[in-house]
Image (cartoon, coloured by chain):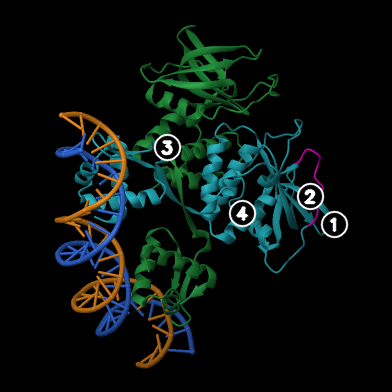
Chain colours: A cyan, B green, C orange, D blue
Amino acid sequence: MKQRLRHDAIVRSLRRNGTLRVEELAQDVGASRRTILRDLSALRDAGFVIHSECGRGGGLQLDPQSVQTTARLSVAEVFALVISVSAMRAARSLPFADLADAGLARIERALPRDKIRDLRRLLDCLHIGQLSPHQDISDIGQMDADLLPAVEAGFLHQHQLRFGYRDAKGVVTQRQVEPQAMLILPPLWYLVAYDPAREGFRHFRMDRISAPDVIPETSFRRRHVPFEDDVCPFRDLPLQPGTASK
Amino acid sequence: MKQRLRHDAIVRSLRRNGTLRVEELAQDVGASRRTILRDLSALRDAGFVIHSECGRGGGLQLDPQSVQTTARLSVAEVFALVISVSAMRAARSLPFADLADAGLARIERALPRDKIRDLRRLLDCLHIGQLSPHQDISDIGQMDADLLPAVEAGFLHQHQLRFGYRDAKGVVTQRQVEPQAMLILPPLWYLVAYDPAREGFRHFRMDRISAPDVIPETSFRRRHVPFEDDVCPFRDLPLQPGTASK
DNA sequence: CAAACGGTGCCAAATTTTGTCACCAAAAGA
DNA sequence: TCTTTTGGTGACAAAATTTGGCACCGTTTG
């Protein structure tokens, strides 16, 4: 049997049986005592907490808190998760915030270095505030599936975005703008951008943007965005406590 | 060099160099052409999208969208992530919902089977609604760190919970109840439980619960919880679209 | 057609993993 | 104190897996 599979089998067996002796475990997964001991060492290296006691009545016990899963995530998925959970925390509706943060931190640590930098830069662009109670939110639409990648590319490579925008009256106009920030006024998300043609900042509701497109030839500098007083940058919220430690 | 490490090296090299021929890649990571081809096959199995073109000017190219991370998460962390992102989606403030869901689905698939069942049962206990605008939310406190594991154990094993509860006037009473559901009225979270001593259902704000404790000897049956009309079970929301497919 | 390139099957050589055995350390009884 | 039980380590040969080399196939491009 392959090493990896046996490791999984050991974890399963320990979880099922509570406490086991090495001999029993060896018989259970069909491997020798020595191999089991080697595997235990590897599993402990991998982060599983396995208590063991010598002598009569001794045995092995897997700390149920340490049962782990390995999941493969694409970078875009990680971004989405981080931003979603961060927004959740920002909205202060979060009894599981610490645990979720710990999970995020672990996911984040697993990212390649340059992607971590990208993620930080994206989070730098995020701001959050309170929606005015007078705002009409009855017509929230679906966001364009291509919007996230486009906005992401726009932010990270400082490229202008072109898209169609349908305003509150339903009139669609073509825009070409410099993306400067994203603003969350739950439950609405806005793209805050500088429009060179109109020489000023504009807020675009993200569910009203259609057919977004990155213009690779373009480039621009980041500007100071004039936010309202009650808008707070995401990075000022205490995020990912796990990243600092270790 | 170990297989796993070489696989990582291949991904790194492809990401660095954009497009490469098999020969070049082999030289880069110090392995033979045949081994590289075998590794490529394994990587594709593992979910990496690697484009290849035959003939002159051909070569390999890693789809940057598919760059993946493997993260090890504890089960509690997965629960916290799933519940957080699900709540996010329920609050309808979610431009990245689909991606985050896909990530969650992948994480969920990686869980051991019985833990998936536990997760489903936990989600079954979750309900969400709208907080009345008259509610005073100025005194939201920190949730007890022991509460989540206790509530989880209570739900999953049908054990009663004992805890101290501080009501709106600041008076603390001892309770021993049957946990029946969790109710989210953003930004507040409530434990909905049946109190046998008082013969009725009670809502407990989770940030006002202290010193929670599971009473393992006890057991109870699930009851039909009388919810308000605007309260909706979590499971009725379209969750984890990825889990159904495949 | 020939050359450049990715991809596959096969098999012996290289490498890693496994099992056996001897032995140590700690805990629990007798 | 002595014996038994049980986790843990080192060494080494046997077993299993991985690797490299080779021949060969299919596709694309000039």
- Tell me how far mark 4 sits from mark 1, CA to CA: 29 Å
Residue matched to label 4: A119
| Quarter holding residue A117 | bottom right
Q: Which sits in the foreground, A6 or B87?
A: A6
Q: Badge 3 sits on which subunit?
A: A
Say above or below: A76 vs B18: above
Circle 1: residue type: Glu
Residue wearing tag 1 = A199
Give the chain of mark 2: A
Q: If the image is split into quadrants, where does the N terminus of chain A sit? A: bottom left
Answer left or right for A50 relative to A128: left
Q: Is residue D13 left or right of residue A45?
A: left
Pointer 1 local density, CA inside 10 Å: few below 14, some 14–19, many at least 20? few
Measuring from the top left, give residue A123's x and y in whole percent.
Answer: 66, 50
Residue A21 appears anywhere in the view:
yes
State the CA–CA distance, disc 3 to disc 4. 29 Å
- What distance separates the C-alpha of mark 3 from that of mark 2? 48 Å
In space, the residues marked 3 and 1 are separated at their CA atoms by: 56 Å
Of pointers 4 and 2, the one earlier in the residue sequence:
4
Give the labeled residue for mark 2: A202
Q: Say which label, 3 or 4, has the lower sequence index.
A: 3
State how far apart marks 1 and 2 are (Cα): 10 Å
Q: Residue at x 63, y 44 (%)?
A: A239
Secondary element at image label 3: helix
- The part of the chain drawn in magenta is A223-231
Q: Residues within 10 Å of mark 4 (few under 14, many from 20)?
A: many
The first of marks 3 and 2 along the sequence is 3
Tag 2: amino acid: Arg
Which residue lies under the disc numbered 3? A65
Give the number of the mark in front: 3 or 4: 3
